[in-house]
Image (cartoon, rainbow, N blue to C red):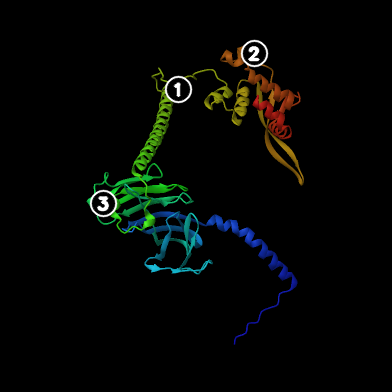
Amino acid sequence: MKRSNRLRPDLKSCLLILILGMLLPLVFTDTARAERSFDLKQIVVEAKALPDASMQVTERLTVDFSGQWNGFYISIPRGDSPVTEVAVSENGRPYEFNSGSQYGPPGTFLVKNEINKTTIDLSINAKDQVRTFDVSYRVVNAVKLHNDTAELYRKFIGSDNAQKVREVKVNLQLPAGAANYEQGKDIRIWGHGPLNGEVNFSAPGVVTWQVKGLPAYTFVEGRVVMPAALFPAAPAEAYTGKTALPGILAEEQKWAGEANRKRLIARAEVGGAAAVVMLALGTVFLLWRKYGRPYATRFDGPYYRELPGQYSPAELSALWNFRKIKPHDLTATILDLARRNFLSIEEERQEISKVFGSREVKTYRLTFLPAPEPASFRKPEEALLRPHEQELLDYLNHTVAGGRGFLYLTDLESFAKKYGRAFYGFWQQ
């Protein structure tokens, strides 16, 4: 006998382990749930209607699991058609039936019979992989025999399915001898579910329902009426004693009209949406032709010898940048005012006090000059100050410089930092 020696934990360690044991499930439960998901890639149902009015079914489910999964189940509508002879396999390997009510190890399954459905629960061990399961069963009394016809009316995918299915395909093999009857007259078929579903005779005596992209909580239902002679071994429980065919035809005609109306509305909505898009694109194109294209110019020379207009730097920038004011507009305006002799700009050195001594920095001094005589300008219009230029000179001279007649650029920087809201208000104006 082997013995294992373990260290005895102290009280603090025990408390820490206890707290972690309480907190870790709370922390990781939601994360684990968020990381777990599965995608129903395909459901292929192979069904065969038998002469005793039962139906043998094999559902092949292809599932793409993300994260760790230990179980997977399907629900089969039950009603007055019991589900028996359940079997599960995967890649030809049968699962073991679990006769109890507790989940077993991977590779087993249990069956739960409820009033309206039968649930087949598979115990698996799947993590980040695609698995394909074959679930087989027999539906007792799946076909009802009326006085004037036999009817198979079955939900192959129930509306309680919470997962979207990429593809659903149901192949129903009718009993032997069905190929001898006229399809569409002696044997009639319908499908119920999403509007994009299809139902047809894929071969003599074979009916196929097919849906691409089945939404969650959406059923796929098939209905077939056929001669009762196809079911000579039907038990007494399968007979209804009613005349049902006229009611079935009227019901299906009504539902077909509603489905066609919904399809027409859906097409109209798609067409309307397409028309709106085309109208919007046409409107954009017309607006572009009228306003978006560059203006045609009458100038044929290689370049302009003069500026096209007497714009100040700030005005030209606002026009060029779609009325947006840029920081360099202020600098350009100051330089233009200096060019026109409303200001003088001189480079100077200043001593800036620091915590540990002082430092000499290069700055520029702006001196406000008297308005020059108009005769001194080469162009008379340059002697006139525009409103925004006059406001800038007044603001710099009286507000920033305090009326002393000059200021340094470092003064302007300090003012903007200290009185940011006031400076920003002037800038916005």
Foreground tag (1 vs 3): 3
Front residue of 115 and 91 = 115
Tell me, yes or no, if residue 341 can be seen here: no
- How far apart marks 3 and 2 lie (CA) works out to 104 Å
Instruction: Please tell me which of labels 3 and 2 falls first in the chain.
Output: 3
Question: Where residue 281 appears, x then y in whole percent?
Answer: 41, 29
Question: Where residue 6 appears, x then y in whole percent?
Answer: 66, 79
Secondary structure found at label 3: strand
What's the residue type where badge 3 is placed? Ala
Please state if 158 lies on the left or on the right of 24 as rendered.
Answer: left
Q: What residue would you read off at disc 1?
A: 291
Question: Where residue 102 appears, x then y in whole percent?
Answer: 54, 67
Q: What residue would you read off at disc 3?
A: 203
Q: Is residue 36 above or below residue 408?
A: below
Count neighbours of disc 3 (C-alpha within 10 A) and say few if under 14, some if 14 to 19, many if 20 or more. Answer: few
Q: Is residue 143 above or below residue 427?
A: below
For the point 37% across and 67% down, the residue is 92
Question: Where residue 13 appears, x then y in whole percent?
Answer: 71, 70
Label drawn at residue 373: 2
